[in-house]
Image (spheres, rainbow, N blue to C red):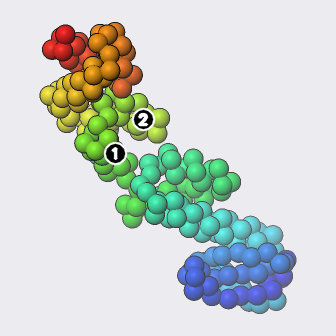
Amino acid sequence: MIVENIEYSDKYNLVKLTISREIFYISYDFFNDLNITKDEDLDFNLYKKILSEDDFNRCKNEALRQISYRAKTSYDLIYKLKKKNYSSESIDRVIDFLNEYKLIDDENYVKSYINDKSNIANWSKGKIRYKLKTKFIDDKLIDKYLNKISYDEEYEKAYNFALRKKESTDEKNKIYRFLASKGFSYDIIKNVLGDLF
């Protein structure tokens, strides 16, 4: 495997190596440590190191691209990177890198998610819990921020939903099922229906 070309890539802030017509991107520090030159014949172990570093850099760029769109949990990001066929070693290194620089933080994600879904989207605590569980967030972390939503806030949301539903139907069972499908607890539903009927 011959090093055909070595150039610095301003676009990625990496060194671009062309080895046997394949392009690899490695960090400048890693390149200096290798001490390779153009037209050098690489042994297989060195080639594997370059391949691994290239995979890490591509994985890191993809992760940064993903989180630039919107915040993600560690699980979401790992899932997306696995779908792109990056190695587990590269994914672990990238997650460590992102955690080190606080670019992903499950606790901030949960806090922001609960705030948005509760106050803007008017979701119930049950629905928020369900959605966060699908993202494999720790129960203790979910409870820590979900418990900050008061009973009165939850009751008010359910009452407003029930009022709107009552305009189209007077059947208590239909309203009960509607509120249950929105994720409201039995106690909230029972109290709302008691006040409406």
Q: Three-letter amino acid code at disc 1?
A: Tyr
| In the displayed structure image, the side of residue 54 where residue 174 appears, left or right | left
What is the quadrant of residue 39 in the picture?
Answer: bottom right
Q: Earlier in the sequence, mark 2 or mark 1?
A: 1
Residue appearing at x 46%, y 60% in the figure: 69
**Quarter of the image that includes the C terminus:** top left
- Dot 1: within a 10 Å radius of its alpha carbon, few (fewer than 14), some, or many (20 or more) residues? some
Give the mark count: 2
| In the displayed structure image, the side of residue 147 where residue 24 appears, left or right | right
Q: Three-letter amino acid code at disc 2?
A: Lys
Q: Position of residue 145 (x, y in %)?
A: 25, 39
> Residue beneath label 2, please?
131
* Visible residue check, residue 67: yes
> Residue beneath label 1, please?
113
On screen, residue 58 above or below 170: below
On screen, residue 41 above or below 58: below
Residue appearing at x 41%, y 30% in the figure: 130
Q: Position of residue 80 (x, y in %)?
A: 58, 51
Asked whether disc 2 touches disc 1, contact meaning CB atoms under 8 Å apart, the reply is yes
